[in-house]
Image: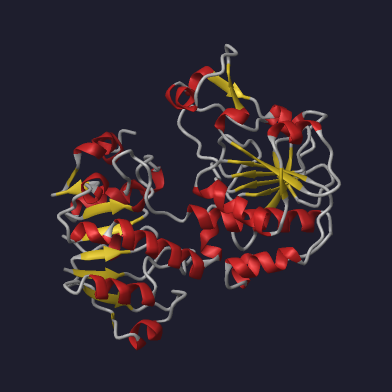
């Protein structure tokens, strides 16, 4: 079986890759029957020479590969028929802008495996870049605070080489006694927490956060039942929230009254209540100065996320009373960071972490008969049709949704 590491062709360019040169060497050592080809790329963080130096074949011809591995969506005209492809297709939520991509995948008889669909038997995602989104998003949130109040001017994360560099830059700054509220305890939330812990910001409880003042910067990390409550007042389990999200309303307003920075690292499920509403932002007692929306659902649960910002221009101001974008230097504005491709700012670390996960969870399935059902669950298309697990996308493919 021949695996191909394809060039990233989406604009803006993405410098990440599924496997680093060293990880591909490990793949060949552990699975000698695997052949590997690396498509030449002018933008990849790891240069062609780094692969070639380790004895890996670098080529422009991927037609003999069985399985093609990429990060972002593959342009329709670059898809090779009758192949197996792994990449983030951004189609499983029926995203309108990628309908033609999924149609082309079916027309070209491609077996598509979306990285988001690689899950275990309990439907938990096994691979992704979430940790690095949290790491960069946390850094950007603090960078934005420093810029808004002219306290310090940190370099862009993309100009630094690693997580350690981000931490070193932050450690040199002096933060006032601010309060940071962080939502989410998944990979994104825990990635953001890594940064806060690394620079020694003190973690406190919900009760302490809401009732006490501190002479140093502090943060609290919230789970779903900390910022949502049942409409009937009952206190039930998290599972009840997941099963019955419409029975809940946001309980986040109590945090807006005492927080300076909100780092949003939660997963937002369908039918869940909005978390930070425009009414909360307009309230006279809202203290929020910076919102780092790492999860970045535009026009979703965070009312000030009215657009996705970019790595080139990551910050904008949000004026609550007029629900519009202004300069983040506007005295009445909240600075918003809503970059939707944060891991791209740390391509080396993100690629290394992703490759390790892919090596652990996915590659063995090709050689052990897919014992854990990883490939079977992840497969979206086969023989020109949607697989049963993804049949819900048929109306989307047909243009009816």
Q: Name the residue at 76% across, 53% down.
A: 145
Q: Name the residue at 57% across, 37% down.
A: 299
Q: Position of residue 198 (x, y in %)?
A: 66, 59
Q: Position of residue 96 (x, y in %)?
A: 39, 43
Relative to 22, is 288 on the left or the right? right
Q: Name the residue at 21% across, 70% down.
A: 31
Relative to 331, is 86 on the left or the right? left
Q: Nearer the viewer, residue 338 or 252?
A: 252
Relative to 163, is 261 on the left or the right? right
Q: Name the residue at 28% across, 57% down.
A: 362
Q: Nearer the viewer, residue 353 or 105?
A: 353
Which quarter of the picture shows residue 288? top right
Q: Position of residue 197 (x, y in %)?
A: 66, 54
- Looking at the image, the residue that sits furthest to the top is 232
Residue 340 against residue 95 in the figure, above or below: below
Quadrant placement of the C terminus:
top left
Which quarter of the picture shows residue 254? top right
Residue 341 appears in the picture as rendered: no
Residue 249 against residue 302 in the figure, above or below: above
Q: Position of residue 277 (x, y in %)?
A: 65, 30
């Amino acid at each position: 079986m021949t695996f191909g590491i394809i060039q990233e062709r989406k604009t803006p360019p993405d410098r990440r890759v599924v496997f680093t040169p060293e990880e591909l060497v490990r793949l060949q050592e552990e699975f000698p029957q695997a052949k590997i080809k690396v498509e030449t790329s002018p933008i990849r963080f790891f240069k062609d020479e780094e692969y070639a130096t380790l004895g890996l074949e670098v080529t422009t011809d991927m037609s003999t590969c069985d399985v093609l591995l990429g990060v972002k969506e593959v342009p329709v005209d670059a898809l090779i028929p009758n192949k197996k492809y792994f990449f983030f297709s951004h189609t499983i939520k029926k995203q309108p802008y990628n309908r033609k991509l999924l149609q082309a995948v079916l027309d070209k008889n491609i077996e598509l495996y979306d990285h988001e669909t690689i899950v275990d038997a309990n439907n938990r995602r096994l691979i992704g870049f979430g940790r690095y989104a949290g790491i960069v998003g946390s850094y950007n949130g603090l960078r934005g605070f420093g810029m808004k109040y002219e306290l310090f001017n940190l370099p862009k994360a993309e100009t630094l080489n690693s997580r350690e560099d981000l931490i070193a830059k932050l450690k040199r700054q002096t933060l006032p006694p601010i309060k940071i509220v962080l939502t989410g305890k998944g990979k994104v939330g825990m990635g953001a927490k890594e940064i806060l812990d690394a620079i020694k910001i003190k973690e406190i409880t919900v009760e302490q956060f809401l009732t006490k003042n501190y002479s140093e910067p502090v943060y609290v990390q919230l789970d779903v039942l900390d910022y949502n409550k049942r409409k009937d007042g009952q206190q039930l389990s998290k599972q009840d929230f997941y099963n019955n999200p419409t029975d809940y309303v946001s309980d986040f307003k109590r945090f807006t009254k005492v927080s300076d920075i909100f780092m949003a690292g939660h997963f937002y499920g369908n039918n869940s209540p909005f978390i930070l509403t425009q009414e909360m932002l307009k309230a006279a007692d809202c203290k929020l100065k910076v919102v780092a929306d790492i999860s970045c659902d535009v026009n979703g649960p965070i009312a000030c996320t009215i657009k996705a910002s970019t790595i080139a221009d990551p910050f904008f101001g949000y004026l609550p009373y007029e629900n519009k974008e202004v300069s983040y230097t506007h005295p009445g504005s909240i600075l918003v960071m809503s970059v939707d491709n944060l891991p791209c700012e740390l391509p080396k670390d993100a690629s290394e972490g992703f490759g390790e996960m892919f090596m652990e969870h996915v590659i063995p399935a090709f050689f052990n008969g897919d014992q854990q059902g990883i490939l079977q669950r992840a497969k979206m298309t086969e023989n020109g049709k949607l697989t049963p697990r993804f049949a819900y996308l048929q109306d989307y493919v047909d243009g009816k949704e």
